[in-house]
Image (spheres, rainbow, N blue to C red):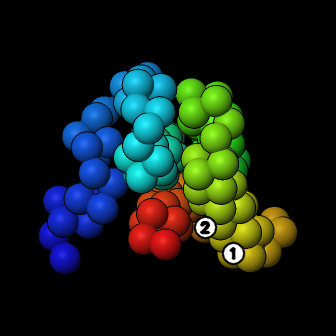
Amino acid sequence: MSEQAALDIFGPAAALASLEDIESLILNNPANPMLRTQAAAFGLSLAAVQTVGVTGFFEDARHVVDAVARAKARMDIAAWHSLEVVRTTAAVLLAAQLFLDEQTIACTEWPAPGEVAAAVLESARRAVEV
């Protein structure tokens, strides 16, 4: 599957490059729950990918999950805490938190930030396929 085809599942949101634009898309489409769900899932993925840096310390992996948590709050607020968006963002955030926890052995092993971001993207895809 090409990268573009993988992003098509997120609808028009996949063409956006900032959380502010995604928030506007959610806010301006109150009668389109599918679009709002796609946008929220993509927003969390975008936040994760934009947080990945060049180092691979545990704190860097944790910062990816932190960014997803902050993006969740932003997407939920933009959607006025509508159920379809909250369900989606909660599922994606929980998947990211579980991935980090399950892949971490204290003081010795943890996932790379890029791996956490990839897990977020995969859980976001699953969330909008449902």
Q: Nearer the viewer, residue 28 or 50?
A: 28
- Horizontal arrangement in the rendering, residue 35 relative to residue 3 (left or right): right
- Asked whether 44 or 34 is in front, the reply is 34
The residue under label 2 is: 111
Q: Is residue 120 placed above or below 79 in the rendered structure? A: below
Q: Amino acid at mark 2?
A: Pro
Left or right: 37 in relation to 81: left
Does label 2 or label 1 sit earlier along the sequence? Answer: 1
Instruction: Give me the C-alpha separation between circle 2 and circle 1.
Output: 6 Å
Query: Which class describes the residues within 10 Å of circle 1: few (<14), some (14-19), or many (20+)?
Result: some
At 17% from the left and 59% from the top, the residue drawn is 4
Residue at the image point whose x is 18% and y is 66% from the top: 5
User: Residue 14's x, y, as percent?
Assistant: 28, 46
Q: Identify the disc placed on residue 103.
A: 1
Q: Is residue 63 visible?
A: no
Element at badge 1?
Answer: loop
Q: Residue 109 location, x and y as percent?
A: 70, 72
Using the rendered view, name the quadrant where residue 128 is placed: bottom left
Q: Are marks 2 and 1 in contact (CB under 8 Å)?
A: yes
